[in-house]
Amino acid sequence: MPEILDGNRVRDEIKAELKPRISTLTAKGRPPGLAVVLVGSNPASEIYVRNKVKTCEDLGIHSETLRPPESVTTGELLATIDALNARDDLDGILVQLPLPPQVDSKRVLLAVAPAKDVDGFHPCNVGNLVAALPGPRPCTPAGIMELLKRYRIPVAGKRAVVVGRSDIVGKPAALLLLHEHATVTICHSKTADLAGVCREGEILVAALGRPAMITADFIRPGAVVIDVGTTRVTDRALAARVFRNAADKLASFDKRGFALMGDVDPVDVIEKASAYTPVPGGVGPLTIAMLMANTVAAAERRAGLC
Ligand code: NDP
């Protein structure tokens, strides 16, 4: 049986390590502060933000959520960000994506002061990532690297294949693997012979958003498989096929009306991988943990502690 890379366990370790750092900051003046800007009422965004706020509360990080209406303009959001940039009691600003279509998302993300950009999306911080300079790293890819490190999975010299080239997952994940001396291939929707390229990967990172598309013929025997994908699947026939009609999975589907599915076939991966992240409970929990880590690091930098 392959090793299960348990994201909940690593998340708890990261949170435990953050607590004394938060206590030190609090004792020196104030706790770290995070502002979350949540526009409108997208149900998925609501859940993500609720989880982020709850994790802040658990850790003693001050958080506040700003809720501009769905009709907000780019100008209004820019003014909101300016005000948050100027606040001394806030170390991090997070703009929950997606923003409504009338808003120029790029301009809004660009307006966040790089020092408060705890998502690592600002071009200054993207530059820091490319140049391997210090700075916040995008949370999901940073979580993947923590998982590999804490499970002592060697990266240097390995062939790593990343499927997906988004700015928030695929590209930064590839860069972080490269900085750890993997030989990295990035795949996308135009990649020829995707399965063949994936089979070269001793480390395979799937970040496509295509439920269970990565099947046995994409996985090199013994590969370490990191499944970033999280899709709410409402198609019962697809769930039945992917979960091989497993009674417990289908009962859960029938109760909830959906199944959370990764990009990797959950049965095939057990047969072929040497280690893998389950969905849920793999990469997902680490994203929020790394957001907290970025917020604490931003607070420490502002307090002159590092
Ligand atoms: P995007 O939609 O921004 O990017 C998807 C990438 O996958 C694109 O580069 C796209 O290629 C590529 N792709 C799509 N279909 C195929 C295909 N058939 N073959 C090869 N490549 C393909 O998604 P994100 O990067 O934001 O997210 C990816 C997944 O990860 C989603 O399921 C998302 O929900 C999940 N996610 C999970 C997080 C967590 O905390 N667990 C956090 C963030 C994301 P192209 O560029 O050519 O279009």
Image (cartoon, rainbow, N blue to C red):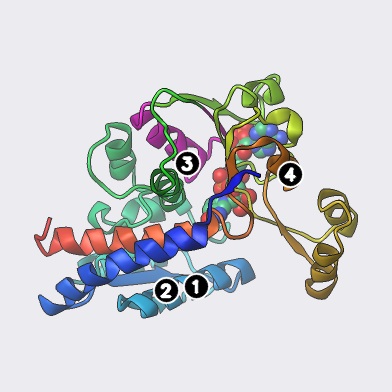
Q: Earlier in the sequence, mark 2 or mark 3?
A: 2
For label 4, the crowd category at 10 Å Cα-Cα, with few meaning under 14, some 14 to 19 and many 20 or more, is: some
Residue 32 picture quarter: bottom left
Q: Earlier in the sequence, mark 1 or mark 3?
A: 1
Q: Which numbered disc covers residue 265?
A: 4
- Marks 4/1 in contact by CB < 8 Å: the verdict is no
Q: Is residue 185 magenta?
A: no
Q: Is residue 284 above or below residue 142?
A: below
Q: Which residues are magenta?
A: 160-181
Q: Earlier in the sequence, mark 4 or mark 2?
A: 2
Alpha carbons under labels 2 and 1: distance apart: 6 Å
Q: Is mark 3 within 8 Å of ligand 1?
A: yes
At label 2, the amino acid type is Thr
- Marks 4/3 in contact by CB < 8 Å: the verdict is no
Q: Nearer the viewer, mark 4 or mark 3?
A: 4
User: Residue, x 41% and y 77% (percent of image)?
Assistant: 65
Q: Which numbered disc covers residue 55?
A: 2
For label 1, the crowd category at 10 Å Cα-Cα, with few meaning under 14, some 14 to 19 and many 20 or more, is: some
Q: Element under label 3?
A: loop
- Marks 2/1 in contact by CB < 8 Å: the verdict is yes
Q: Is residue 186 left or right of residue 149?
A: right
Q: Which residue is mark 1?
A: 51
Name the quadrant where ligand 1 sits: top right
For label 3, the crowd category at 10 Å Cα-Cα, with few meaning under 14, some 14 to 19 and many 20 or more, is: few
Alpha carbons under labels 4 and 1: distance apart: 27 Å
Where is the N terminus found, in terms of image quarters?
Answer: top right
At label 4, the amino acid type is Asp
* Residue 82 visible in the picture: no
Q: Is residue 75 above or below residue 60?
A: above
Residue 134 on image: x %, y %: 22, 43
